[in-house]
């Protein structure tokens, strides 16, 4: 049993465990399907459960139940032994430290999706149907493949600071020096640092926005653009009066999706500043309160807060799905 | 999410040949506008330079990295003085204090089952929701759809304490399990979308011939779903390989993947850019290869209305 659970630091053992896990899993699923296929006239419910059962059990035990417990814990004290009512929420909304966190989060959710979508849209529109379209799109798309940790390191290097008199190794400071300015410690000066950290996120998400919006731009029927052109619409007028209205639904999806991602992203801030210098956001503070400060109740309250913010989007999505199901 | 679908269905359809002349005309038009081209080039440069900088740095000797900016290599190279080496990569991979080779194995061990397991479970579930008419089906499907964007932060701590109670915390098993659970809502939704595109008559004909659902699943549906599997597979692969949160909370030093280790290095050896740059690229190389070779499927997955939360 011990051998099956822990591989220690032996790479061969780890790889063996990996294969064992896959084989066990395949055997288990095979067994389920075998049982489902067995009876001559199985009830629909039986077969249905055979197919969706594994997913339902996992989601109930692994998502729903823990979520309910987190909500419960958010009304408990720091080690979940005593009921404290709304104390954690009151603290999250009144203590100066958390007000900064909430302010930063609001800033992130408002600014990052807009800027990322702006760049993605502008770029998608500009390179659309140009000769270099696929290469050009590849360049902006590539950051989506790498981890947020990796992206943060790439940008941290751009922001690198060396004191006056020493040769700069960070590109941004070198530019400032070339222009005759003094090098800055970008990541420690609030509120600028929050925006500079946001750049990393925007750099990643613009590719996502570009991909979706580009597909949407290409889906605009040619006769619409043609008719507009005959009416003498061109250049920016075309963009504002034809492109934007035609892709509005996709724009809404892109903006909300990036906003949702923004809420949950903690890797970037953690890697750039670890939340110091007034840069923390709710998703990171949740982690720090739980695992560094040992404030379970507060941490749970912050997680619940993240959840509460996305509820309207969930409701909206479900309604949209219902509508599109009816269309089918 | 679901609403994208309607807008993006069109580009899959091949354009009529008459569109070509139109295309060519527009291409000339775009290129003839210098402002538009300049702006596009500026964005492309802004998006590329930071990565190039770190990549160049990863091949420079430690002393050079400390003393001068990476852009100086171009001047040096022209003067015939540039020095490049793989030393940083060797240090990052095998030096005792960084030891990324070990973490590379961990990333690999974490990722494979965490991609395979949810795909299989989601395939079955998607089939059930698409083709088996059992009671409560619609309600359950909407519920799973809604779970897609619930922040996983809300589940992590109780899940971890459940693992602790069972005595399995800090093992690969809990990481595989957690990733599989978190992947399910998106996976089911995405595969269900693809599955709904299979003509109903095809499935019904097989059913008429007396095939049970299990046979239909394996003989009719599965072979048609390969592109969908690739689309979700690459998502999940990138997600798990690049994940930091789950790895950090559910894992321990024996299971930490590259992301955790590289993030640690960024904190503890933040000034050692020669190691950090090489380390960052070691962590990036596999997802980049996967991404570039399967990009087509990735885009398809994105457009099918998939956004992981």
Image: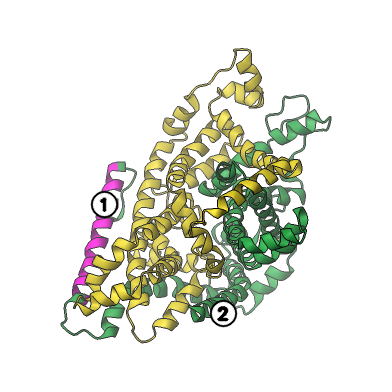
Chain painted yellow: B
Count of picture labels: 2
User: Quick one: SS at disc 1?
Assistant: helix
Which quarter of the figure has residue B44? top right
The chain to which mark 1 is attached is: A
Q: Which residue is identified by label 1?
A: A19
The reply to whether the C-beta atoms of the residues labelled 1 and 2 are less than 8 Å apart is: no
Residue in the image at 64% along x and 67% along y: A252
Mark 1 to mark 2 CA distance (whole Å): 42 Å
Residue at the limit of the structure toward the right, as seen here:
A180
Residue A193 on image: x %, y %? 73, 48
Which quarter of the figure has residue B124? bottom left
Chain painted green: A
Residue A274 visible in rendering: no
Residue A207 visible in rendering: yes
Q: Which residue is identified by label 2?
A: A319
User: Quick one: SS at disc 2?
Assistant: helix
Front residue of this view, candidates A35 and A166: A35
> What residue range appears in magenta?
A12-36
Identify whether A326 is placed above or below A262: below
Within 10 Å of the Cα at label 1, are there few (<14), some (14-19), or many (20+) other Cα atoms? some
Q: Is residue B119 left or right of residue B25?
A: left
The chain to which mark 2 is attached is: A
Identify whether B71 is placed above or below A130: above
Residue at the limit of the structure toward the top, as seen here:
B80
Residue in the image at 84% along x and 29% along y: A180
Front residue of this view, candidates A85 and B129: B129
């Amino acid at each position: 049993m011990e051998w099956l659970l822990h591989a220690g630091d032996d790479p061969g053992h780890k790889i063996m465990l990996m294969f064992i896990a896959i084989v066990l899993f395949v055997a288990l699923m095979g067994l389920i399907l075998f049982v489902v296929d067995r009876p001559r006239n199985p009830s629909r419910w039986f077969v249905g459960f055979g197919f969706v059962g594994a997913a339902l059990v996992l989601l109930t035990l692994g998502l729903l139940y823990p979520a309910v417990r987190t909500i419960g814990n958010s009304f408990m004290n720091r080690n979940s032994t005593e009921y404290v009512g709304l104390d954690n929420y009151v603290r999250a909304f009144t203590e100066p430290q958390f007000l900064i966190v909430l302010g930063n989060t609001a800033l992130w959710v408002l600014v990052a999706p807009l800027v990322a979508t702006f760049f993605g849209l502008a770029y998608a529109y500009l390179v659309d149907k140009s000769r270099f379209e696929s290469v050009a799109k590849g360049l902006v798309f590539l950051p989506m493949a790498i981890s947020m940790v990796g992206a943060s390191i790439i940008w941290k290097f751009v922001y690198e600071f060396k004191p006056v008199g020493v040769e700069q190794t960070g590109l941004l400071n070198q530019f400032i020096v070339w222009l005759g300015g003094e090098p800055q410690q970008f990541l420690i000066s609030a509120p600028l640092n929050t925006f500079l950290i946001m750049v990393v996120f925007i750099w990643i998400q613009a590719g996502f926005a570009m991909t979706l919006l580009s597909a949407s731009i290409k889906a605009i029927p040619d006769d619409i653009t043609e008719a507009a052109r005959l009416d003498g619409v061109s250049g920016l007028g075309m963009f504002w009066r034809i492109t934007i209205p035609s892709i509005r639904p996709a724009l809404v999806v892109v903006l909300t999706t990036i906003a949702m991602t923004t809420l949950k992203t903690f890797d970037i801030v953690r890697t750039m500043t670890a939340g110091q210098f007034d840069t923390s956001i709710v998703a990171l503070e949740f982690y720090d309160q739980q695992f560094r400060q040992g404030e379970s109740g507060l941490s749970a309250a912050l997680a619940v807060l993240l959840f509460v913010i996305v509820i309207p989007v969930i409701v909206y999505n479900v309604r949209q799905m219902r509508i599109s199901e009816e269309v089918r | 999410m679901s609403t994208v679908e309607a807008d993006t269905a069109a580009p899959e359809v091949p354009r009529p040949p008459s569109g070509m002349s139109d295309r060519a005309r527009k291409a000339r038009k775009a290129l003839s506008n210098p402002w538009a081209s300049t702006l596009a080039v500026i964005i492309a440069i802004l998006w590329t330079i930071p990565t190039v900088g770190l990549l160049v740095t990863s091949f420079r000797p430690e002393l050079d990295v400390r003393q001068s900016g990476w852009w100086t290599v171009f001047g040096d190279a022209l003067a015939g003085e540039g020095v490049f080496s793989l030393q940083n990569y060797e240090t990052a991979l095998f030096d005792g204090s960084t030891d990324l080779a070990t973490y590379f194995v961990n990333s690999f061990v974490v990722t494979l089952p965490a991609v395979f397991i949810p795909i299989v479970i989601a395939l079955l579930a998607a089939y059930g929701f698409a083709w088996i008419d059992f009671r409560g089906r619609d309600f359950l499907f909407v519920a799973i759809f809604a779970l897609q964007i619930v922040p996983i932060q809300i589940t992590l701590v109780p899940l971890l304490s459940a693992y602790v109670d069972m005595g399995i915390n800090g093992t690969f098993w809990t990481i595989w399990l957690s990733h599989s659970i978190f992947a399910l809502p998106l996976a089911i939704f995405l595969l269900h979308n693809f599955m709904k595109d299979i003509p109903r008559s095809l499935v019904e004909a097989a059913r008429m011939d007396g095939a049970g659902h299990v046979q239909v699943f394996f003989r009719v549906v599965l072979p048609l779903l390969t592109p969908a599997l690739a689309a979700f597979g690459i998502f999940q692969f990138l997600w798990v390989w690049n994940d930091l949160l789950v790895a950090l909370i559910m894992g321990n030093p024996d299971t930490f993947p590259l992301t955790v280790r590289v993030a640690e290095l960024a904190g503890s050896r933040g000034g050692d850019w020669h190691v950090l740059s090489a380390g960052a690229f070691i962590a990036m190389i596999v997802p980049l290869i996967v991404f570039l070779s399967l990009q087509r499927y990735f885009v398809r997955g994105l457009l099918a209305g998939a956004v992981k939360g």
